[in-house]
């Protein structure tokens, strides 16, 4: 049996990756539809190696007969079209922030809380978590099962692709401009991103956190355990694709680096590359196009009881967005929800 699948935001970074992964993983599709804003109507995007999809206008599209909608076009757009799609009977898997903290919408990472998928029937919507939350929790879930996490302190090093194609273009233009002495211009970031790091992702909140840092805290509580304390500092770095995280974790009981390494080696979605030698770890440049969340630099923290330090790296466009959404759809099909 095949399904009718619509990809909203089909011309964006994540939308194109969704189309690529659906084809690559041979998701059972009878009909694939690309949707975007009116200005992108008529654009052609690839679906697999041989097929081309002509993008249709989201504003006028009739969702009747559509089984799955995989959306990555922005929170306001999801809020606008979702009621129309769900009334027509479609199940939405949404990559935006709009539905994540809705108590009637499951927030799902298949390797972490696949059981939550069953709750989609309340609104016919499943939310994809933030990219930085996804990779962190894929790595931490097996450790939480082993020794129960009480506190997480995480510093992220997030690539510009997390802010979209225009942000990637800005990094490229600024980098080139430095070498040829062009004037420095910026539109996507609050400060220069080329040869710089910016401790500011999303808007500032009243308590001093940025919205990105808040997302990591509340999403971790919703997905993994509401009792876990989370402190995050989220930083944009001049890398095109691939997020990295330095994660400090405190546990309820003792856990050694060897125990953590062994349990992570058997964990779904995780690849351990942890050699205490030159090149014995994974960097963002090496994770591009890979499905796994890579864990390196596993070591015990001598400054706290029951503490570990980890280095966690993943392709934020792939596992941090598109792949996670497709994996949710695969679970829906396999379990016949």
Image (cartoon, rainbow, N blue to C red):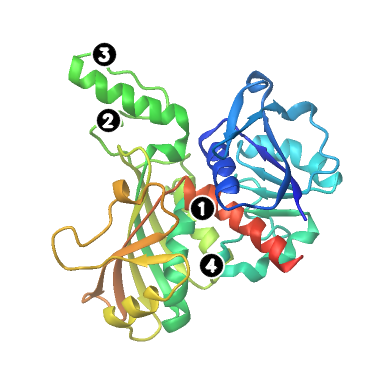
Disc 1 to disc 2, how far (Cα)?
A: 26 Å
**Could you tell me which secondary element the residue under label 4 belongs to?**
helix
Tags 1 and 2 touching, CB below 8 Å: no
Quadrant (top left, top right, bottom left, bottom right) of the C terminus: bottom right
**Residue at image point 47% right, 40% down:** 202
**Residue at image point 84% right, 43% down:** 65
**Counting residues from the N terminus, which is met first, the one under dot 4 or under dot 2?**
4
What residue is shown with label 4? 111
What residue is shown with label 2? 194
* Percent position of residue 66, x then y: 79, 44
**Could you tell me which secondary element the residue under label 3 belongs to?**
loop
**In the orientation shown, which residue stands out farthest toward the bottom?**
253
Disc 3 to disc 1, how far (Cα)?
A: 35 Å
**In the orientation shown, which residue stands out farthest toward the front?**
50
Disc 4 to disc 2, how far (Cα)?
A: 35 Å
Please name whichever residue, 44 or 101, is drawn nearer the observer in this view of the structure.
44
**Counting residues from the N terminus, which is met first, the one under dot 2 or under dot 3?**
3
Disc 1 to disc 4, how far (Cα)?
A: 19 Å
How crowded is the residue under tag 3: few (<14 C-alpha within 10 Å), some, or many (20+)? Answer: few
How crowded is the residue under tag 2: few (<14 C-alpha within 10 Å), some, or many (20+)? Answer: some
* Percent position of residue 91, x then y: 76, 51
């Amino acid at each position: 049996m095949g399904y009718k699948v619509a990809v909203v935001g089909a011309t964006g970074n994540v939308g194109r990756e969704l189309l690529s992964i659906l084809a690559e993983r041979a998701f059972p599709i009878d009909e694939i539809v690309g949707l975007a804003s009116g200005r992108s109507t008529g654009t052609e995007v690839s679906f697999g190696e041989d097929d081309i999809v002509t993008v249709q206008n989201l504003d006028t599209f009739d969702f009747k007969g559509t089984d799955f909608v995989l959306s990555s076009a922005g929170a306001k757009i999801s809020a606008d079209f979702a009621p129309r799609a769900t009334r027509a009977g479609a199940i939405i898997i949404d990559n935006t922030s709009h539905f994540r903290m809705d108590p009637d919408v499951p927030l799902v990472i298949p390797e972490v809380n696949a059981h939550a998928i069953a709750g989609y029937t309340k609104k016919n919507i499943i939310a994809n978590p933030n990219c930085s939350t996804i990779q962190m929790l894929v790595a931490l879930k097996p450790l939480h099962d082993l020794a129960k996490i009480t506190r997480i302190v995480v510093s992220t090093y997030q690539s510009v692709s997390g802010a979209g194609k225009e942000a990637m273009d800005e990094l490229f233009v600024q980098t080139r401009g430095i070498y040829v002495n062009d004037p420095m211009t910026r539109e996507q970031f609050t400060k220069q991103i080329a040869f710089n790091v910016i401790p500011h992702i999303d808007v500032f909140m009243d308590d001093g956190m940025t919205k990105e840092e808040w997302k990591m805290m509340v999403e971790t509580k919703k997905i993994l355990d509401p009792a876990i304390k989370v402190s995050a500092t989220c930083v944009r770095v001049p890398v095109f694709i691939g997020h990295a995280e330095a994660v400090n974790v405190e546990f309820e009981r003792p856990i050694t680096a060897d125990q953590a390494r062994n349990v992570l080696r058997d964990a779904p979605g995780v690849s351990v590359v942890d050699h205490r030698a030159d090149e014995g770890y994974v960097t963002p440049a090496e994770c591009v196009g890979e499905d796994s969340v890579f864990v390196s630099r596993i070591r015990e923290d001598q400054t706290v009881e029951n503490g570990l330090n980890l280095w966690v790296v993943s392709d934020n466009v792939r596992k941090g967005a598109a792949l996670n959404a497709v994996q949710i759809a695969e679970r829906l099909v396999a379990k016949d929800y």
